[in-house]
Structure formats: structure tokens, C-alpha cells
Image: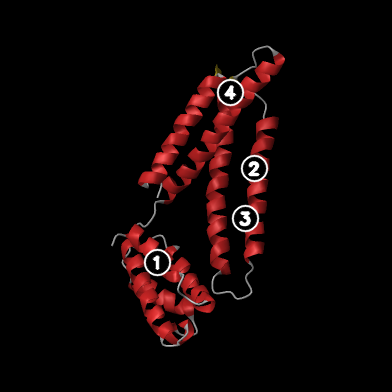
């Protein structure tokens, strides 16, 4: 089976695990999957073998600790050392997929806001775009997304193999970071002065560009361009 099929099969089989065994196995599974330099295909094959072994042991009344030991992280590290290296996921395309999705929605919202305001004011709304502030805003969005991806994965790693970890606290941390990042982008949009060369970017052009980018992102997810 290909990696995608193995992941789907893994999700289905994990439902058969007890709560304790599922937590033990899932921590190792996520930990291994977060090693982005490993072969995805062989990582998923090993994870499936581990899951089948655990299910067989569970039917015999054994726990995950009985089968894999009391140190799941150490066991996972041994597996990682024996797996071949291969670029599992290109980080830059992954981040660009998130950025393009954000930009597409921002452009579509911008177009909708401009046309809505113009209807109420009964006059054309200034749709000029200044190059330098726009580039600065895009750089901030790109940096926020890159740092956000790192922060998200770091939060996940810290919660693994930790019985005191709280999913609600972790989600709160990520949520606060997202809110701060969004607030920073909104503040920059509002307070950065207009300077440098400018060009007209009408509401329909904004909607059209945003729509095209959204379709690209949608197709990218379908065909795994941003994997």
C-alpha cells in the first residue's frame, strides 16, 4: 500500500485500541511522523507493523507497555535511527500553501468590502495598492506563518510522552498566537502609511485574483502539491 493508504488504514485500526494503548501508540506515531527527514513510505510501513503487533498483543491481554516497554520515546528514537532518510515533506511548499490560502481570502474579502462600501457611499472607493507597504505586509504574513508552523509543531512535541500535558492548554497557546498574529497583520494594514509606487487594483480584480489563488490552493491540497 502507498503511504496515504497506510495512513487511512492506520486511522481505522487504531479505533480498536483501548484508551491507554491508543494514547501510548499515538504519541509514538506522531513523534515519528514529525521527523520530516524520514521516508514517509517506510515510516508508515513500520507504524503499521507496530500497530498490528500491538493489536495482537492486546487480544492476548497485554498492554502497550508490556510490548514496547516503559520508554516509548526511547523506543521511537531507536526506530527513527533505523529508518532511511528522505525528504518527507518540503517545508517551504507547505508554508506557501498556508500563505496562499490566507492571501486568497484576504483578496476576496478586500474585493467584497470595496464593492459593499461603494454601494453605501454611492461613489467609487479608492482601490489603489501601494507596492512597498504591500510587500512589507506579505513579508510579515510569511514570517508569521513560518514561525506559527514551528510553534505549532513544538507545542505538539512538548505534549508527547507527557502525562501532565493538557490538550486545552496547548490549543489555547496556539489560539493566542494566532490571534496575536492576526492582530499584528490588521494593525499593520491600518497604520502603515502609503508610500512608494502605486497601482489601481479594482474590487473585481481583487475578487478574481483571490478566487484563482483559492482554486490553486484547493487543487494543491487535492493533488498534494503543498505536501
Q: CA distance from mark 4 to mark 1?
A: 50 Å
Q: Which mark is residue 202?
A: none
Residue denoted by label 1: 10
Q: Earlier in the sequence, mark 3 or mark 4?
A: 4
Badge 2: how crowded within 10 Å, few (<14), some, or many (20+)?
some
Its colouring scheme is secondary structure
Q: Quadrant of the N terminus?
A: bottom left
Can residue 133 be seen here? The reply is no
Q: Position of residue 132 (x, y in %)?
A: 57, 27
Residue at left offset 57%, top offset 40%: 141
Q: Nearer the viewer, residue 197 or 4?
A: 4
x 33%, y 73%: residue: 82
- Residue 215 image offset from top left, x and y in percent: 43, 35
Characterize the local packing of mark 3: few (<14), some (14-19) or many (20 or more) Cα atoms within 10 angstroms: some
Q: CA distance from mark 2 to mark 1?
A: 35 Å
Tell me: residue 107, above or below residue 168.
above
Tell me how far mark 2 sits from mark 3, CA to CA. 12 Å
Pinpoint residue 103: horizontal percent, then vertical percent: 53, 35
Q: Nearer the viewer, mark 1 or mark 3?
A: 1
**What SS does tag 2 mark?**
helix
Q: Determine whether label 1 and label 3 are within 8 Å by CB.
A: no
Q: Foreground mark, 3 or 4? A: 3
Q: Which residue is mark 3?
A: 174
Q: Residue at x 43, y 68 (%)?
A: 32
Estimate the spatial distance between the alpha carbons at disc 2 and disc 4, rounded to whole Å.
Answer: 21 Å
Q: Most extreme residue toward the left, as rendered?
A: 1
Residue receiving disc 4: 130
Q: Nearer the viewer, mark 2 or mark 4?
A: 2
Lower sequence index among marks 2 and 3: 3
Question: Tag on residue 182?
Answer: 2
Amino acid at each position: 500500500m502507498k503511504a496515504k493508504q497506510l495512513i487511512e488504514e492506520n486511522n481505522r485500526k487504531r479505533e480498536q485500541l483501548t484508551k491507554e494503548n491508543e494514547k501510548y501508540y499515538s504519541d509514538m506515531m506522531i513523534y515519528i511522523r514529525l521527523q520530516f527527514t524520514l521516508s514517509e513510505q517506510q515510516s508508515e510501513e513500520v507504524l503499521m507493523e507496530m500497530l498490528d503487533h500491538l493489536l495482537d498483543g492486546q487480544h492476548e491481554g497485554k498492554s502497550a507497555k508490556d510490548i514496547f516497554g516503559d520508554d516509548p520515546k526511547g523506543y521511537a528514537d531507536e526506530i527513527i535511527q533505523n529508518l532511511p532518510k528522505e525528504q518527507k515533506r518540503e517545508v517551504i511548499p507547505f508554508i506557501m500553501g498556508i500563505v496562499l490560502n490566507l492571501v486568497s481570502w484576504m483578496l476576496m474579502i478586500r474585493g467584497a468590502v470595496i464593492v459593499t462600501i461603494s454601494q453605501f457611499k454611492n461613489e467609487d472607493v479608492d482601490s489603489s495598492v501601494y507596492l512597498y507597504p504591500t510587500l512589507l505586509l506579505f513579508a510579515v504574513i510569511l514570517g508569521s506563518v513560518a514561525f506559527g508552523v514551528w510553534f505549532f509543531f513544538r507545542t505538539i512535541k512538548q505534549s508527547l510522552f507527557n502525562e501532565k500535558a493538557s490538550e486545552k492548554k496547548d490549543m489555547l497557546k496556539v489560539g493566542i498566537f494566532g490571534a496575536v498574529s492576526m492582530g499584528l497583520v490588521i494593525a499593520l494594514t491600518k497604520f502603515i502609511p502609503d508610500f512608494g509606487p502605486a497601482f489601481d487594483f479594482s474590487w473585481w480584480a481583487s475578487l478574481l485574483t483571490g478566487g484563482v489563488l483559492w482554486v490553486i490552493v484547493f487543487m494543491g491540497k487535492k493533488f498534494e502539491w503543498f505536501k
